[in-house]
């Protein structure tokens, strides 16, 4: 008998971003924008906090739910940021934001359940319920007046009473779409009526470019017992991608079972990594880091969008958040072929849109968390491709 994985695993889609990246591995002449991270290291005060923890011998197991000091800091951070009352006993620290997504699915979803996902979306988010054996229904964003838009009626029609959970990532990867307050209230009311869980991925909430300090959170409209699970991460706002540190905010009634699921995944996040997260939230330089990052991203975003529009043949809808331009080139429908050609012939590394689902076919994603000089170099390479 052939040794194969179970059907749910075999049916998963491999990362097309990795497929393209692997084609360029080992080359030192590339201008790379395919991954969702910046080109600067984690701030020194965060690194120093983790180094001090290691120096103090904080290398042992800790509580499944995380260090009490970090859980309290997260609760205070969320409460102050969104003007709500979140208590530490609703917070669970996880070994990355993607681990938080998987744990949330394991807590709520069973094989055969129906899960609705707003797309296009980072593949890990849509594949997590499929890994458990759920059936995933995709509701795509559309473009209206040059901006990414959600057809709210279409989403509500998809949220039938037999739906177990809806997953929304806003600000969205890859489009940058943000969900406005009225839509949040409407979705929450509909899900309350039918007992549908909401899994809201708000990892990019601090990366918005409309003058706000953060994108609106679904928790703002929720009561403590609403069926809402919020995922967040230290990766983006504090330049901590490689640290693998995230958190969940859940209803109080769910917390009894959260430590069990964390135990059977990772047991706990490392104490010294958590100390880095604690510094990010409690040291005044943490907010300074976020502000500087957002300011730099806003300038880089404008440089990239203006540059793309100036090249011609390119459609790049506006969006208010995240760190990506999601665009398509007229006459270039095969995004995988374009991405491969850009890497092999022009040394430009972009993520293929189809990595984010069938809605992204023909599109490309460019992470603009980079220096103006690097973006300008990338634009020159793309221009050479267009003139080939």
Image: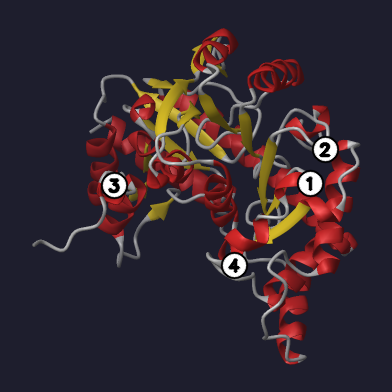
Q: Label 4 neighbourhood size at 10 Å, few (<14), some (14-19), many (20+)?
A: few
Left or right for 254, reference 223:
left
Name the residue: 52% across, 51% down: 102
Which disc is residue 224 wearing?
A: 2
Quarter of the view holding residue 153 = top right
- 160 or 155, which is in the foreground? 160
Vertical side of 163 occupied by 293: above or below: below
- Contact, mark 4 vs mark 1 (Cβ under 8 Å): no
Residue 311 location (% of width, % of height): 42, 26
Quarter of the view holding residue 357 = top left
- The span from disc 2 to disc 4 (Cα, nearest Å) is 24 Å
Residue 221 location (% of width, % of height): 81, 27
- Contact, mark 2 vs mark 1 (Cβ under 8 Å): yes
Name the residue: 54% across, 16% down: 155
If you read the primary sequence from the N terminus, does the residue marked by circle 3 or circle 2 appear first? Answer: 2
- The span from disc 2 to disc 1 (Cα, nearest Å) is 7 Å
Whether residue 360 appears in this view of the structure is: yes
- The span from disc 3 to disc 2 (Cα, nearest Å) is 52 Å
Q: At numbered mark 4, what does the secondary structure look like: helix, strand or loop?
A: helix
Quadrant position of the C terminus in the picture: top left
**Closer to the camera: disc 3 or disc 2?**
2
- The span from disc 4 to disc 1 (Cα, nearest Å) is 18 Å
Residue bearing the label numbered 3: 346
- Contact, mark 1 vs mark 3 (Cβ under 8 Å): no
Which disc is residue 263 wearing?
A: 4
């Amino acid at each position: 008998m052939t040794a194969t994985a179970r059907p749910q695993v075999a049916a998963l889609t491999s990362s097309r971003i990795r497929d393209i990246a692997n084609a360029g591995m080992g080359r030192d002449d590339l201008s790379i924008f395919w991954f969702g991270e910046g080109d600067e290291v984690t701030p020194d005060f965060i690194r120093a906090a983790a180094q001090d923890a290691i120096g103090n011998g904080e290398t042992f197991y800790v509580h499944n739910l995380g260090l009490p000091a970090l859980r309290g800091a997260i609760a205070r951070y969320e409460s102050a940021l969104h003007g709500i009352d979140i208590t530490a006993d609703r917070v669970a620290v996880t070994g990355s934001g993607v681990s938080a997504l998987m744990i949330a699915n394991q807590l709520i979803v069973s094989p055969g359940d129906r899960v609705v996902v707003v797309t296009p979306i980072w593949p890990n988010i849509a594949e997590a319920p499929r890994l458990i054996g759920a059936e995933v229904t995709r509701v795509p964003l559309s473009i209206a007046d040059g901006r990414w838009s959600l057809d709210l009626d279409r989403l509500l029609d998809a949220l039938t009473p037999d739906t177990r959970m809806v997953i929304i990532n806003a600000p969205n990867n890859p489009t940058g779409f943000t969900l406005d307050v009225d839509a949040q209230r409407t979705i929450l009311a509909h899900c309350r009526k039918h007992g549908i869980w909401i899994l809201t991925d708000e990892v990019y909430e601090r990366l918005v470019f409309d003058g706000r300090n953060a994108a609106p959170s679904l928790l703002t409209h929720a009561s403590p017992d609403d069926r809402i699970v919020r995922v967040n991460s230290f990766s983006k706002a504090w330049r901590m991608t490689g640290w693998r540190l995230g958190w969940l905010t859940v209803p109080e009634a769910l917390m009894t079972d959260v430590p069990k699921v964390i135990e059977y995944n990772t047991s706990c996040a490392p104490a010294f990594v958590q100390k880095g997260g604690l510094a990010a939230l409690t040291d005044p330089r943490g907010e300074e880091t976020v502000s500087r990052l957002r300011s730099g991203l806003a300038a880089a975003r404008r440089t990239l969008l203006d540059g793309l529009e100036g090249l011609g043949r390119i459609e790049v809808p506006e969006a208010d958040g995240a760190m990506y331009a999601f665009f398509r080139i007229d006459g270039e429908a095969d995004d995988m072929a374009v991405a491969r050609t850009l890497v092999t012939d022009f040394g430009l590394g972009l993520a293929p849109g189809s990595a984010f689902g069938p809605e992204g076919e023909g599109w490309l994603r460019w992470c603009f968390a980079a220096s103006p000089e690097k973006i300008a170099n990338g634009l020159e390479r793309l221009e050479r491709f267009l003139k080939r």
